[in-house]
Image: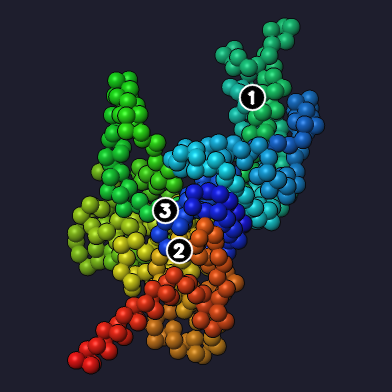
Amino acid sequence: MRYTVKNFGPISLADLEMGDLTLVCGRNNTGKSYLTYSLFSLLSFARNDILVSPDDSEAKILCKMGKVVIDLVALATRYNERFSNGNMQRFIDALPGSLAVNKSVISSAEFKLEVDTEVMRKSLMDLEYEGREFWQVSDNCKIFLKKSRGQSTVECRLNIDEISPSSSSSLLTDEDGKETLPQNDVIIRNLQLLISFLINHSVQDAFIITCERTGVAIFGDEFSIFRAMACEDDKNLVRMGELRKRFGFKGYPLPIRKDLDFSLKLSEISTKDGFVAAKHPEIIEALNSIVGGQYSFNKDTNSIRFKPLNHDLSLSLVESSSSVRSLSELTFYLKHKSRKGDLLIVDEPELNLHPDAQRKMARIFAMLVNAGIKVFITTHSDYILRELNALIMLNNLEKEKKDNIFAKHGYTDACMIGRDQVKCYVLADGKTIPMVPHERLGYPVSSFDDTIEQFNALYNDITDVDEQC
């Protein structure tokens, strides 16, 4: 996947070729959040709002014959063309609302996304429908799907067996008063939506964890209460609108809203098993070791509880440490929502974590990559970068030396990562600068190194003065 941004806020040109693990580093106010939030917004748009229309002739065949076979893989191969037509303008028009920014911020902005169509092809080939799955067109008309695994095409078949007198007004009536198929334009529109849904959902799904995660963890209940109050009656709703207008409130960026929605839906989400928890429980155990305990969801109180190791306590997030709050969303995502092939986006994973925990987080990201989840992070942490460099260097060692280091320092093959799997960028002066890894030492980041060298110089001067005294 490749993501390119021009003239957006402080960013003049950002060009990211994504790896299995992608890092963006940089000083404050260089545009990392703009870059991250816009990437997530565009991926969300791609999975939900891109229109992928079959040929007109195929739509007409469905209307006339009641059945058509559509080549999904052929449509997916041309998918990237969809980002250069009217779809992108619809995305840009919606972006100020998605990011809660003024239109002036995006007045000359350009965005480009190139997804991996080979990954899409494999995803579509894996689809399997037995003929019972359907897309609802109207009250008594459905489009049924039939597709074998390994097949590039899907058969779409109309079915109107359950016509009743209370049918939709979109249905036509013949001379005898018998209801027939919906109008052709209704069928064609629904075929477009169906095919768009199938292809769009082969695009990599993204889950984002923002820097505001600790606030969401604490104040989620209050958001839920105020939202319920606003919807109780028209007076509250009007009053809420007046206050928003008075204070110029533009809402929250889409990524933060997604954080909040995830928190508010945990009662439903926690009933499901995510890919990581089911197939790689060692990653959940590694996360538990960082926070020093285990999370659970209490349905009676509709809240997250945390149980510290070797204690009988059951704490709310308000009662828990900031590190527990910071990692709660990541843990519940991995336990209950993660799927193989996802893109996990984490804004500043080092938030509220001790340097030792930051190093362990780098190992968890490597473990996730090896398990089949791609990771994108923005970071100010030299510890995370140095740990990843250590994992890359360890991965290149001969087996005997590697085993000795594993035994001494507690590493495993599960957290090793190859240099070709990692992409690292520094965002500075409005541009992304790709970091070229040193053959032996890994990725350098000048902003980190400069600060460390300045500290070393300061301490050298201080100790020199002490010695002279």
Foreground label between 3 and 2: 2
Cα separation between marks 3 and 1: 40 Å
Q: Residue 440: x percent and y percent?
A: 54, 83
Q: In the rendered image, which residue does mark 2 sit on?
A: 26
Query: Which residue is situated farthest in the top direction here?
Result: 176
Q: Residue 106: x percent and y percent?
A: 53, 42
Q: Circle 2: is it few (<14), some (14-19), or many (20+) Cα within 10 Å?
A: many
Q: Circle 1: is it few (<14), some (14-19), or many (20+) Cα within 10 Å?
A: many
Q: In the rendered image, which residue does mark 1 sit on?
A: 141
Q: Quadrant of residue 294?
A: bottom left
Q: In what quadrant of the picture does the C terminus appear? A: bottom left
Report the disc number at residue 209.
Answer: 3
Name the amino acid, label 1.
Cys
Where disc 2 sits, the SS reads: loop
Q: Residue at x 45, y 53 (%)?
A: 33
Foreground label between 3 and 1: 3
Q: Is residue 376 above or below residue 388?
A: above
Q: Is residue 207 visible?
A: no
Which of 131 and 150 lies nearest the eye of the viewer? 150
Where disc 1 sits, the SS reads: strand
Q: Residue at x 29, y 24 (%)?
A: 239
Visual colour scheme = rainbow
Q: Circle 3: is it few (<14), some (14-19), or many (20+) Cα within 10 Å?
A: many
Mark 3 and mark 1 lie on one chain; the one further toward the N terminus is 1
Foreground label between 1 and 2: 2
Name the amino acid, label 2.
Gly
